[in-house]
Amino acid sequence: MLRALHRLLPAVDARAVVALTAWLATAAVLQGVVLGLAGTSVAVLVGTGYEAAEPWLVALTLTALGFVVVQGVAQSAAFRTGSQTARALHLALGDHIAHLPLGWFTPTRQAEVVDTATTGVPRLMSYPAILLRPAITAILTPVAAAVTVAFLDWRFGVALLAASLVAWWASTLSQHLARTVDLRRHRADVEAANRVLEYAVRQPVIRTDRRSEDDDALERALGEAAREARRSTATVLPGLLLFSVTLNVLFAALVAVGVLWVAGATLSVPAFVGLLVTTSRLTAVAAAGAELAAGLRLQRGALDRVADVLCVRPLPVLDLPPEDPPGTDVLVDVQGVSFRYGDVPVIQEVSFALPRRGLTAVVGPSGSGKTTIARLLARFWDPSAGRILLDGADLRGLETGALYRRIAVVLQDDHLADGTIAENIRAAAPEASPADLARAVRAAGLDSALHDLPAGLDTANGPGGARLSGGQRQRVSIARALLKAAPLTIMDEATSALDPENARLVGVAARDLARTSSVLVIAHHLDTVVHADQVLVLDRGRIVQQGTHAELVGQRGRYRELVAAHLEDAEDGRRADRGVPGEGEG
Ligand SMILES: Nc1ncnc2c1ncn2[C@@H]1O[C@H](COP(=O)(O)OP(=O)(O)OP(=O)(O)O)[C@@H](O)[C@H]1O
């Protein structure tokens, strides 16, 4: 575990752990010597008398004092290193997460990261102070004690060393048994936590649907977690028993060996008494170490989970040869891009260009790959084939900062930071003037909503934007993108949660923005599509048509079908508003 911790920590913190280990190791050796000297002193005192025992007693006192001092220093270093380690791991996690591919953050992984950061890392904080010491003591103290008593009787020293090795083997075996179970138990716990979360979040749907499958899934996950917990206890218990039984058998064996040597007159009774003092104290130290083994295992599990996150590779920034200078009109050039989620191909050999200025609308049936295309442009993942050039440079060769400075993204499920509305909008362009802010707010159709909010732009939106309506949240995201005015703005269904009037306003804002930069909208409103400079029609991961609305509507094909379906939906909606039944209805 020490090695794993050392690997994960930055150099300076890793050095602190090494220094602490050295202090703890010194303390453990001194403790072993104290135990050995205690036995030897008793043996000499009982066998020969005070005068002969005096040098041993002096050595014992001085070593004991040294042990107390070193132990004190080690213990305070351990507490310091504990909080330093936790802080370093938190920073390492935060830093690493900031570089992970955006596509990595699925809801399950988000839950795992939260669990690792809030439970795993704090758990590791107590590692150096409470658990590292007994772990080191369990190994070094018996060795030091065995070497010390070897001066009294070398045979007993060897026997003690052999017994320590057997005890260490038993402890390793019991830990190994338990670790496999711990891992399974953790997975079952995470799965159960996810189901509980899902059950809580989906309450409105679950109550209205009343599907028994939802209850079943939750019950199955909770049942599995309970089964794993029982299995874990059933496996850990024999492991712990194995260790404590081994310890008692070893103690009995050492006593028996001593008795045999006393009976054979090769060991004096006072020396045997002294050796018993050392052996019984050592057994107590080893048993205390075993009690902490469960805690050590839990921390090992926490460390493994931190390591799992830290081992996910960020998308590499490739050292690519310089491209041809960018064409003057083209900002984004998508060249033969394919993409698969796992083994499932979703985007297939897609090529298109986004002009430096202009509005591009992406349309297509549900599941055709619109969101995936938009996310590939923002480098959520890398394409499995082909390449995407931004301003003539392959996305894979751009530093994260350089890439996201040039892109603004409005996602379907934008999550606002806990703060005020103004802070959230300004996050995109902190240096923007109040006039720019007001313009973006107006253009996003947010000003009308502000009248209903208690402190206008300074209203706190709550964690994730929980105190705002879906439409208000979306307008804040749009205002943020408008204020950023990046060379490329990507809007994924940005108008889906808005009423028709506000959707129209946002469409106008997107068109305004498109006069000076490139805007790609996954469009659901015919109004946006009609005014787009180009329309990309996607079907089953391929671009099947491309052109302006006027061009495409004049051609047979998918686009005409989509427009017809859209108009039909709109007509049905109007009929419903007027209370007139549509075709096929009563
Ligand atoms: N994270 C994912 N893992 C696996 N498959 C996915 C994932 N996200 C999307 N897909 C699949 O990829 C395909 C394209 O999805 P995408 O969300 O890009 O479509 P879309 O056109 O935006 O759909 P919609 O209009 O319904 O939002 C779908 O078949 C979808 O099931």
Image: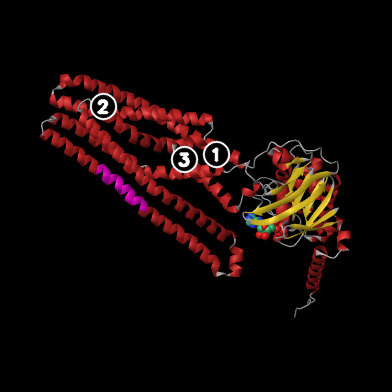
Q: Residue tagged by mark 3?
A: 124
Quadrant in which the C terminus appears: bottom right
Badge 1 residue CB within 8 Å of ligand 1: no
Magenta-colored stretch includes residue 245: yes
Going by the numbered disc 2, the residue's amino acid type is: Thr
Residue at left offset 88%, top offset 63%: 554
> Residue 188: x, y in percent?
48, 55
Q: Earlier in the sequence, mark 3 or mark 1?
A: 1
- Say few, some or many: other residues with alpha carbon within 10 Å of mark 1 (under 14 / 14 to 19 / 20 or more): some
Tag 3: amino acid: Leu
| Residue found 34% across the figure and 35% down from its top | 139
Which residue in the structure is indicated by mark 2? Answer: 148
Bounds of the magenta span?
Answer: 235-248
Q: Horizontal and vertical percent for residue 351?
A: 77, 51
State yes or no: residue 180 in magenta.
no
Q: Which residue lies under the disc numbered 1?
A: 90
Does dot 3 land on a helix, a strand or a loop? helix
Is the residue under label 1 in contact with that under label 3 (CB below 8 Å)? no
